[in-house]
Image (tube, grey):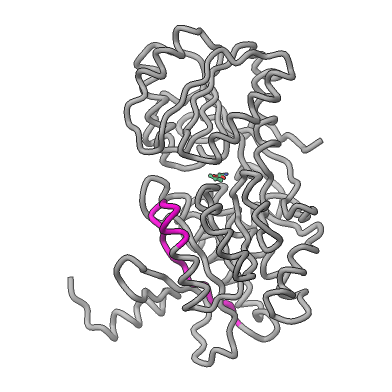
């Protein structure tokens, strides 16, 4: 297909999006179209817009876009408009590292939003830290991410909490005594969450009867599931991402395993049930937000998101929105728009009312927030309960 280039550009500008430099370093821009750089604030975003975790990146990007649009419409920050340069990493840590380097050295961004996946945030964080560029991950939950240094923040809870939420839910609500684990050994998030779940589940008196592993990208899980089946667990904890979890669920049912699967936020995608179909009905996972939440700020966000993009936002979109809003709030409070002052203001974030809860950044640059448990029901996700941090 061929467009006349000025037509192409104006269509894209009208959509508020400008596609630059095609090829592997493809970036997309949202927000300010100021011609004078003095009138804008440039932020970088890195996400998996393509690949096996594409919905993580696209939902987060849309949540960020909505936030940026709202901030710019209400006057911007210190008389400047925000512009976000978004880069795709195809779900690969090495691409995430390249992207963040390019954003810092070429686009001269003063802050970074991303990544979703902990392994990719871990590839980016040392680069942001060395260059003293504040980085806010919307939803990377592995504790190691913010331990990289004092420029690295997150607006979500961490996995020691998330693991305990699902262990308590399994033991307390589902009355599970014997659990199995099936973890993705290529994924820092999955390994961490499996360990944290095990810790709490054992403390509560439960037993992990078998602990199996796979690697992201695998498509055949039959041998692991066969050895899990012989141990007769009452639930299987699968802290992976939606593509593999969907396949695991199908193959588990094909092998006659009836136990529910349990998981974490990595299940959060409309693709989960597209891939897993009925096999996931009656399974449960922990998450950052539920669209069933009737509070006004949540419903307002859902309405604005629907008006702009058409669908109900998932947790990733809500976290992307909150991350951008928390960063904007810090920029408004910062003494100047220098990176160090933004860092300082981020560290002082207190009681910020986000869509995913009240956000206070603690000493370790993490947010302490409740989690929700969702049930896979009729092809969608139904709210089950909220668990507060103790
Ligand atoms: N918490 C996951 C990680 O750290 C990423 C994730 C967050 C995935 C929210 C889906 C939803 O890797």
Numbered disc total: 0
Residue situated in front as seen by the camera: 184 or 315:
184
Quarter of the image where the C terminus is located: top right
Residue at the extreme front:
130
Residue situated in front as seen by the camera: 114 or 99:
99
Question: Above or below — where is 337 with respect to 192?
Answer: below
Q: Quadrant of residue 81?
A: bottom right
Task: Give the extent of the magenta segment.
Answer: 81-97
Residue at 71% of width from left, 72% of height from top? Answer: 342
Left/right placement of residue 136 relative to residue 251 reads right
Residue at the extreme left:
1
Residue 89 in the magenta stretch? The answer is yes
Residue at 74% of width from left, 75% of height from top? Answer: 341
Spot occupied by residue 110 in the image (x, y as percentages of width and height):
60, 75
Residue at the extreme bottom:
36
Spot occupied by residue 208 in the image (x, y as percentages of width and height):
60, 16
Question: Above or below — where is 100 with respect to 368?
Answer: below
Left/right placement of residue 231 relative to residue 216 reads right
Residue at 41% of width from left, 50% of height from top? Answer: 54
Residue situated in front as seen by the camera: 87 or 302:
87
Question: Above or below — where is 174 with respect to 161?
Answer: above
Spot occupied by residue 299 in the image (x, y as percentages of width and height):
64, 52
Spot occupied by residue 290 in the image (x, y as percentages of width and height):
62, 42
Q: Quadrant of residue 8?
A: bottom left
Residue situated in front as seen by the camera: 45 or 375:
45
Left/right placement of residue 45 relative to residue 293 reads left
Quarter of the image where the N terminus is located: bottom left
Question: Above or below — where is 216 with respect to 112?
Answer: above
Left/right placement of residue 47 relative to residue 347 reads left
User: In the image, ligand 1 is in what quadrant?
Assistant: top right
């Amino acid at each position: 297909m061929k467009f006349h280039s000025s037509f192409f550009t104006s269509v894209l500008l009208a959509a508020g999006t400008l596609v630059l430099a095609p090829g592997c370093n493809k970036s997309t821009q949202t927000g300010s179209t100021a011609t004078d750089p003095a009138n804008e604030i440039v932020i970088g975003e890195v996400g998996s817009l393509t690949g096996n975790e594409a919905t993580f990146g696209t939902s987060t990007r849309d949540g960020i876009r909505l936030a940026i649009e709202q901030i710019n419409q209400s006057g911007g920050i210190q008389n400047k408009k925000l512009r976000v340069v978004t880069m795709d990493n195809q779900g690969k840590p090495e691409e995430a590292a390249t992207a963040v380097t390019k954003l810092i050295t070429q686009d001269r961004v003063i802050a970074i939003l991303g990544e979703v996946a902990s392994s990719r945030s871990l590839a980016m964080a040392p680069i942001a830290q060395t260059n003293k560029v504040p980085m806010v991950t919307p939803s990377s939950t592995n504790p190691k991410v913010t331990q990289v240094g004092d420029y690295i923040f997150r607006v979500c809870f961490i996995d020691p909490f998330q693991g305990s939420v699902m262990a308590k839910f399994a033991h307390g609500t589902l009355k599970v005594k014997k659990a199995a684990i099936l973890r993705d050994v290529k994924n820092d998030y999955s390994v961490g969450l499996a360990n944290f779940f095990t810790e709490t589940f054992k403390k509560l008196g439960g037993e992990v009867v078998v602990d199996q592993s796979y690697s992201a990208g695998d498509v055949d899980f039959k041998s692991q599931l066969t050895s899990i089946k012989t141990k007769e667990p009452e639930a299987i904890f699968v802290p992976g991402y939606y593509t593999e979890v969907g396949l695991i669920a199908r193959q588990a049912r094909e092998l006659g395993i009836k136990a529910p699967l349990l998981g974490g936020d990595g299940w959060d995608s409309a693709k989960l049930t597209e891939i897993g179909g009925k096999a996931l009905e009656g399974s449960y996972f922990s998450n950052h937000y539920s669209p069933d939440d009737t509070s006004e700020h949540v419903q307002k966000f859902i309405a604005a998101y629907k008006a702009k993009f058409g669908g109900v936002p998932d947790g990733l979109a809500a976290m992307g929105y909150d991350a951008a809003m928390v960063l904007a709030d810090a920029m408004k409070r910062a003494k100047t728009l220098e990176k160090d002052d933004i860092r300082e203001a981020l560290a002082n974030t207190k009681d910020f009312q986000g869509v995913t809860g009240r956000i206070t950044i603690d000493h370790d640059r993490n947010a302490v927030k409740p989690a929700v448990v969702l049930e896979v029901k009729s092809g969608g996700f139904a709210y089950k309960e909220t668990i507060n941090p103790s």
